[in-house]
Amino acid sequence: MGISRLLHHLEPYATPVVLEKNKNDDAREAGITSTKLIIDGPGLAYYAYHQTISRRSQAGNALEAMPTYKEVNVFVFKLLAQLERCGLDIAAIFFDGRLPHTKRETRISRLQTYLNQLINFRAQHPQGPRCDPKEVFMYNDIFASRPIPAKLRNLPAAPFLVPSVIESLQASQYASVTCVVPGEADAFCADLAKTDGGGIVLSGDSDLLVHDLGPEGCVMLFRDIDLGDRGKLKTFVYQPANIASAVGLGSLLPLAFVLSVDCYRTMPECIRLAKEVGMETVGFREFCREYGEVTADRPAPATLPDNASHLQQIISQHLRVLDPRISEYVYQVVGTTSNSSSPDPADSSRTMYLPFLIDDPSRASSWRPSTPLRQLAYSTLNLSTQHPDDPTSTEEFQRR
């Protein structure tokens, strides 16, 4: 969902660092004051997934290359352990618990893209995979960066990738730092870095650079991780506050806004226009809302507003560990969402975006047999709210 070419323009401002346990002079010289690591959970899951696929170079197609959930989770734990060996302290792993209504069109568009990929793949491979994927997996040097051949990228990711990673983390030593948050993970990662004395936010999304991470917060991207030399982490860090200061801006928000309008502008032109942007600029106020801070209406993951009901508090604690889609739906029902005090007027019905299954697109969706069970679940939850203004229907998105 990111801002096109934002990273392209900011790459020259990245600082190379080498992180090593008890030997972080290089990091301190680069202005990194904390070894606290805050991880974007979905980014972690997809990074592990794609790294695992990149080891299947002998696979004939994307379906053969698709790893098992167990293999992805094994990679996740090896990666986290290696990061800790390099002297980083994992403070939090946040997962999206609900996306705002403004992402609706993007989500629908993405589902359509997945469907097109599936239809094209089915047409090209009518006989299915040639062999068991386990026969083509390569285990050596799992942290090395390898490009993924185009033929292995033409299917959507495994449908329960993120829930699988959450479930594994919750059953491990990382359970206490793993949380499905009542909003987008980006905002919570940024808020923790800002309010808790800085830290490194590890993400696959350049949008983190636009959030306010405070004067000591910085961003490290999964794509820049180099763990080839065991015990050392070679990477690049982006310090948004320092970058903004270097180009004469108070923050990177105006620069990102200018790029969102026209991503092909040069950096000098973007800087010049960004200095002219103000809250009265058409579209800028709305743009800023997407990158706003965690407030009382969008509580930090471990807390709820003081006026939250006991039921809401209990539900929130349970939703911290559930599949994000279930979390998202329940938040719509009980109202413990990031926008609960000012519901979106477009929310005339509750929505459920079902995971996109890798099945035969020429046949009915594999979700169809369980439709009555889901209807019962939706109805049971909807009965828990009696307010006359509450939505009475559920809009479900799936392949037909």
Image: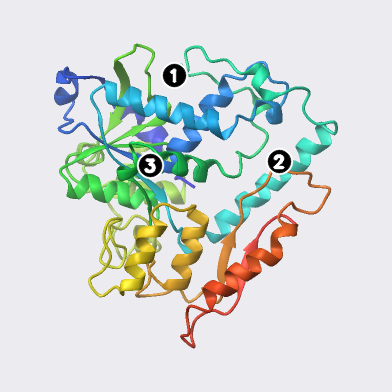
Q: Secondary structure at mark 3?
A: strand
Amino acid type indicated by mark 2:
Gln
In the image, taking residue 71 as reference, residue 321 lies left or right, namely: left
Amino acid type indicated by mark 1:
Phe
For marks 3 and 2, give the CA distance: 26 Å
Viewer can see residue 209? yes
Going from N to C along the chain, the mark reached first, 3 or 2, is: 3
**Vertical relation: 293 (above or below) 220:** below
Residue topped by disc 2: 117
Is there CB contact under 8 Å for labels 3 and 1? no
Query: Outermost residue toward the front?
Result: 171
Q: Quadrant of residue 341?
A: bottom left
For marks 3 and 1, give the CA distance: 19 Å
Residue topped by disc 3: 40
Residue topped by disc 1: 143
**Vertical relation: 241 (above or below) 321:** above
Query: Outermost residue toward the bottom?
Result: 388
Amino acid type indicated by mark 3:
Asp
Query: In the image shown, does 338 or 238 lie closer to the viewer?
Result: 338
- The quarter of the rendered structure image containing the C terminus is bottom right
Residue in view at x 38 percent, y 50 percent:
185
Please provide percent x and percent y for residue 101. 49, 64
For marks 1 and 2, give the CA distance: 28 Å
Please provide percent x and percent y for residue 221. 37, 32
